[in-house]
């Protein structure tokens, strides 16, 4: 898996704070962006986040490129509807070499690993046979398994990113999307450390949301936002 941060809103914390402060200021957001002190920015961010009035977080966004993941993973990812996606098309891209993502649990069991490779290999050979026979890639792709490697670009605003991290950084999340979420958080945090300081699974901030399905192994608590 290769996760890269392609772009984010410049100075995202200041952009969020200026948008929030605008509601109560006699001057415009452009002037607020230039004149607000760092202490003022942090104070506004703290008020916004702790009060739950998080719509202003939507004024900053992040764009990630995620390569080397399975179609099974991206089917989960695109369920986060408040985001924008572009994915490598199996309709227009035909594959000459097989590339599949193997779950660690399968890889750790020699018998399961062999079954997995055999099934994926057979599916790919049938796929290539259809392509070579003149069948369009958009039809031959029906044979490709969920394990097929893919690439995707995703853009989320900060409000949705925090929600995404809460669900997908949890230890109960599926292993592949959790790995991507943890890497995305690590890439985003340096650019907005105050906003992302307690991002991640719900147990970082309070009780677990999983009820009877809890893993029972919470993360260390996040620092208090001062």
Image (tube, helix red, strand yellow):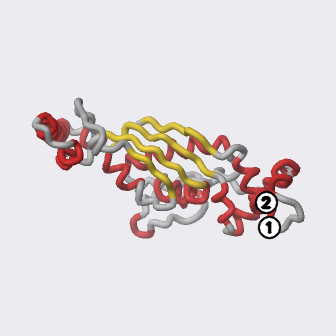
Report which quarter residue 48 is drawn in.
bottom right
User: Would you place residue 21 above or below residue 180 in this image?
Assistant: below
Callout 2: SS: helix
User: Would you place residue 78 above or below residue 121 in this image?
Assistant: below
Quarter of the C terminus within the rendering: bottom right
Give the residue at x 36% y 42%. 88
* Depth check, front residue: 203 or 1: 1
Give the residue at x 30% y 38%. 93
Total numbered badges shown on the rendered structure: 2
Give the residue at x 18% y 37%. 117
Q: Position of residue 158 (x, y in %)?
A: 61, 55
Tell me, for residue 62, which label it has, or none: none
Give the residue at x 71% y 69%. 51
Q: Is residue 182 left or right of residue 61?
A: left
- Judge the density around disc 2: few (<14), some (14-19), many (≥20) Cα neighbours within 10 Å: some
Q: Position of residue 97 (x, y in %)?
A: 23, 30
* Depth check, front residue: 139 or 77: 139
Which dot, 2 or 1, sits closer to the camera?
Answer: 1
Report which quarter residue 180 is drawn in.
top left
Q: Position of residue 157 (x, y in %)?
A: 59, 55
State the residue position of label 1: 23
N-terminal-most mark, 2 or 1: 1
Callout 1: SS: loop
From mark 2 to mark 1, how far is it between C-alphas?
Answer: 12 Å
Q: Position of residue 114 (x, y in %)?
A: 15, 36
State the residue position of label 2: 44
* Depth check, front residue: 59 or 44: 59
């Amino acid at each position: 898996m290769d996760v890269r941060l392609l772009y984010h809103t410049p100075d995202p914390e200041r952009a969020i704070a200026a948008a929030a402060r605008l509601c109560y200021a006699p001057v415009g957001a452009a002037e607020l962006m230039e004149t607000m002190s760092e202490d003022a920015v942090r104070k506004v961010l703290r008020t916004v986040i702790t009060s739950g009035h998080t719509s202003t977080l939507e004024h900053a966004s992040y764009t990630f490129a995620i390569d080397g993941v399975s179609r099974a993973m991206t089917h989960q990812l695109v369920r986060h509807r408040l985001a924008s996606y572009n994915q490598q098309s199996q309709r227009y891209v035909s594959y000459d070499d097989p590339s599949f993502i193997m779950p660690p649990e399968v890889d750790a069991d020699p018998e399961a690993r062999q079954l997995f490779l055999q099934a994926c290999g057979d599916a790919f050979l049938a796929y290539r046979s259809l392509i070579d026979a003149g069948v369009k890639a958009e039809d031959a792709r029906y044979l490709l398994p969920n394990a097929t490697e893919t690439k995707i670009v995703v853009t989320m605003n900060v409000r949705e990113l925090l929600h995404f991290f809460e669900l997908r950084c949890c230890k109960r999340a599926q292993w592949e999307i959790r790995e991507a979420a943890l890497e995305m958080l690590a890439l985003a945090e340096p650019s907005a450390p105050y906003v992302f300081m307690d991002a991640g699974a719900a147990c970082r901030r309070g009780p677990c949301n999983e009820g009877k399905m809890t893993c029972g192994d919470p993360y260390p608590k996040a620092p208090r936002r001062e």
